[in-house]
Image (cartoon, grey):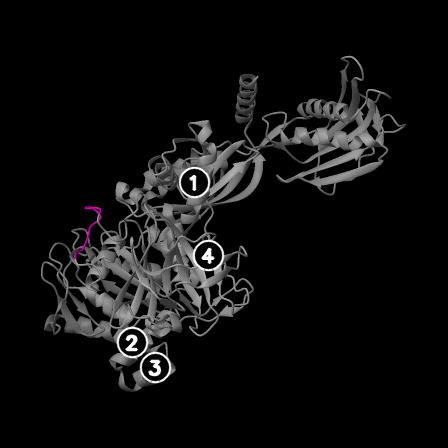
């Protein structure tokens, strides 16, 4: 394989909603480029893209697949991304390391919520976009309606390059208004027959061609002047104008294909090879210091690892992009993130599960290697001439779904944790958390299907039986009024005993409250004489103010840290449900000690009990986490989604239309979000998506508080 230079390389992400046909398109692209001799199919489980065991089992793309083609002395690197929103991490990874997105649209449905989600990522990352309308042979395909929807959603930047003469089972020809030809295929697709445009289509084709020429000319002043003078552009001028329009995101060319029948794919390859931007045309990446690192093959050697795959019989396969310089097999590099030295063995050009050994890859190219000793996803390896160049530009979305995980055999726990850590290298949107607060191991993901795949892989690939449980909710406890309590801890068992007595007052605390001067309980006044005051920002949110107001030496100052420790112990395991307590002022105003038997432990235990008793008498309340929920849903399903939200104690905050879809905003308790991804998918046939963000803690309803306290008491009894 020849060594392609930076100005001969193009990096392209294939993205789109699930069912839009990306894997099938990838097969046709590879076939047309001569990389494979026979096209596989998802149904026959023999595609280049879906080769991992879990994908073969599910018949569904789970991981992004990297492959390349050589076309007309250019190298096209593709990353075929999963369509399900549960595996959005693959699309985000791909968009960050490629220079253009081909967004597939299912001709039966037009732009879907998944399409819009993917488009938003291209918008955020400022990536050029080509729209590809697929499955034109479907009975339900209405091309004109799809184009109207696209213009409604994406505006006038959608510029038609092609349109079909007929859709449905009789689709076999289209008009290409860039080259102004009619393209026709036989039953097996492949290379089209090129003919003159029929007379009855000439007017429509001329009108669309003129619109295309005008859109291309708008991206260059010289072209615009020529267009005003002549109203025509040469083929090369058109290409230049379209390329500039793509780079600036001022135009989104629209193509037509039937990937399953290999119709329109060769023409798409021509456009990708001849028109879309090269790596050298695109803006430089910035390193973690904010400095630009140009894709210069003569620059310092630096490669970024964006994906790790765990392949059967091989182990870790590490995928990288050459950010600068040239990389060779056998190079000795330094890990800029970990400080370790690394030698690259063989380097490869990628073709799904196949790899083609190469001697050199230059800036902008994508490749892979195996058997690295200390490289993780997101690491940068630098050559000797690189001054600690490091990249960290891939940002993943927040998880939407969580489950507590445990090994069915407790002896397997350590193995499970090791495998989970390793698997997160493959998909960084899997997040594993050892929660001290919930006393559970929590796995977070993008949806129920996302975590189901993780479980399948643990059980089938690793032979580790695990089970999921609903995670506990991180409630908080607080108080609503003042209360006081005294507790004496006394223990005598021969020799030195234990003695400590603590009298304290608790009340709700908010930052900026005035210091207490006097408290009244049952007609009796307790005057405060503050000796010391400490305010703690609690790690779990909220505050604790601890005041020492003991007079007359009733408790020695040296025991105050022990009393504070007892209070904090109880704050960490709240008296009502064992949840963290917050926003409390504690005033220690009296107590007793013994000259021999008093020690730190005695006062810690006395403070713990005194605080617990006072807390329970101070109008205790449970707070629950409330999240901001944003849902993107087709208007047909709005009624069902809103009804479901009302049953989940959600408060609708607003509704809006955005790019052809309804955007619904609500506040909802975390407890009610536990299975929401499953419910929303069921309600909308998988055509809606949502995001969440923590908002605040609010009081739970009285009936729920009673239930939670009863459940906690039951758990404590079972533990005893």
- Residues tagged 3 and 4 counted as in contact (Cβ below 8 A): no
Q: Earlier in the sequence, mark 4 or mark 2?
A: 2
Q: Earlier in the sequence, mark 1 or mark 2?
A: 2
Q: Residue 419: which disc? A: 1
Numbered range of the magenta stretch:
38-45
- Which quadrant holds residue 461? top left
Give the residue number, with chain letter if any, for mark 3. Answer: 224
The quarter in which the N terminus is drawn is bottom left
Q: Quadrant of residue 354?
A: bottom left
Mark 1 packing: few (<14 Cα in 10 Å), some, or many (20+)? some
Q: Is residue 479 visible?
A: no
Sequence-first tag of 3 and 4: 3
Of labels 1 and 4, earlier in sequence is 4
Q: Between residue 93 and residue 146, name the one nearer to us.
A: 93
Horizontally, residue 169 falls left or right of residue 246, namely left
Tell me the tag on residue 394.
4
């Amino acid at each position: 394989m020849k060594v392609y230079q930076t100005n001969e390389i193009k990096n392209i992400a294939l993205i789109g909603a699930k069912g839009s046909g990306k894997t099938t398109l990838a097969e046709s692209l590879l076939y047309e480029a001569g990389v494979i001799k026979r096209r596989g199919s998802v149904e026959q489980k023999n595609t280049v893209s879906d080769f991992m065991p879990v994908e073969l089992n599910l018949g569904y793309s789970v991981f992004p697949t990297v492959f390349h083609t050589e076309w007309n002395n250019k190298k096209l690197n593709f990353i075929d991304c999963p369509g399900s929103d549960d595996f959005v991490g693959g699309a985000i990874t791909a968009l960050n390391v490629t220079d253009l997105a081909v967004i597939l649209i299912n001709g039966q449905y037009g732009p879907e919520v998944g399409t819009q989600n993917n488009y938003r990522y291209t918008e955020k990352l400022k990536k050029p976009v080509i729209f590809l309308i697929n499955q034109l042979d479907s009975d339900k395909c209405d091309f004109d309606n799809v184009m109207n929807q696209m213009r409604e959603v994406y505006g006038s930047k959608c510029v038609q390059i092609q349109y079909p003469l007929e859709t449905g089972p009789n689709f076999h020809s289209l008009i290409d208004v860039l080259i102004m030809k009619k393209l026709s295929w036989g039953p097996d697709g492949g290379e089209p027959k090129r003919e003159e445009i029929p007379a009855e289509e000439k007017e429509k084709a001329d009108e669309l061609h003129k619109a295309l020429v005008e859109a291309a000319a708008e991206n260059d002043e010289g072209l615009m002047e020529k267009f005003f003078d002549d109203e025509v552009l040469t083929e090369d001028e058109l290409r230049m104008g379209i390329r500039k329009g793509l780079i600036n995101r001022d135009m989104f060319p629209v193509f037509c294909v039937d990937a399953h029948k290999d119709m329109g794919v060769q023409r798409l390859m021509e456009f990708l090879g001849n028109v879309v931007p090269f790596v050298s045309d695109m803006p430089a990446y910035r390193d973690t210091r904010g400095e630009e690192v140009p894709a210069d093959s003569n620059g310092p050697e630096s490669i970024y690892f964006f994906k790790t795959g765990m392949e059967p019989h091989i182990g870790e396969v590490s995928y990288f992009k050459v950010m600068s310089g040239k990389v060779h097999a056998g190079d000795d590099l330094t890990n800029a993130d970990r400080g370790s030295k690394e030698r690259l063995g063989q380097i490869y050009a990628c073709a799904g599960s196949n790899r083609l050994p190469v001697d050199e890859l230059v800036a902008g190219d994508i490749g892979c290697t195996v058997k690295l000793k200390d490289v993780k996803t997101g690491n940068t390896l630098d050559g000797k001439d690189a001054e600690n160049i490091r990249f960290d530009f891939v940002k993943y979305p927040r998880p939407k779904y969580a489950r507590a995980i445990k090994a069915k055999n407790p002896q397997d726990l350590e193995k499970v944790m090791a495998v989970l850590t390793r698997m997160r290298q493959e998909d960084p949107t899997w997040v594993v958390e050892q929660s001290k607060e919930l006393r559970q191991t929590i796995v977070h993901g993008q949806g129920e299907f996302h975590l189901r795949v993780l479980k399948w892989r643990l059980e089938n690939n690793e032979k580790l039986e695990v089970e999921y449980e609903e995670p506990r909710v991180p409630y908080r406890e607080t108080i609503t009024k003042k209360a006081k309590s005294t507790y004496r801890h006394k223990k005598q068992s021969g020799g030195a005993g234990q003695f400590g007595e603590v009298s304290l007052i608790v009340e709700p605390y908010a930052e900026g409250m005035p210091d207490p001067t006097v408290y009244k309980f049952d007609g009796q006044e307790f005057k405060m004489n503050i000796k010391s005051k400490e305010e703690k920002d609690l790690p779990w949110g909220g505050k604790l103010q601890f005041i020492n107001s003991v007079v007359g030496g009733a408790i020695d100052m040296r025991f105050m840290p022990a009393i504070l420790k007892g209070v904090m112990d109880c704050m960490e395991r709240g008296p009502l449900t064992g949840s963290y307590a917050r926003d409390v002022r504690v005033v220690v105003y009296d107590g007793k000690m013994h000259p021999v038997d008093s020690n730190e432990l005695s006062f810690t235990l006395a403070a713990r009990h005194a605080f617990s008793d006072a807390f329970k008498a101070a109008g205790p309340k449970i707070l629950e986490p409330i999240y901001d929920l944003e849902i993107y849903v087709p208007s047909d399903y709005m009624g069902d989604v809103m009804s479901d939200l009302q049953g989940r104690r959600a408060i609708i905050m607003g509704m809006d239309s955005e790019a052809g879809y309804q955007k619904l905003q609500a506040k909802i308790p975390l407890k009610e979000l536990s299975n929401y991804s499953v419910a929303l998918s069921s309600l909308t046939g998988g055509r809606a998506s949502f995001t969440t963000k923590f908002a605040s803690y609010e009081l739970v309803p009285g009936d729920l508080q009673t239930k939670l306290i009863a459940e906690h008491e039951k758990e404590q009894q079972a533990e005893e």
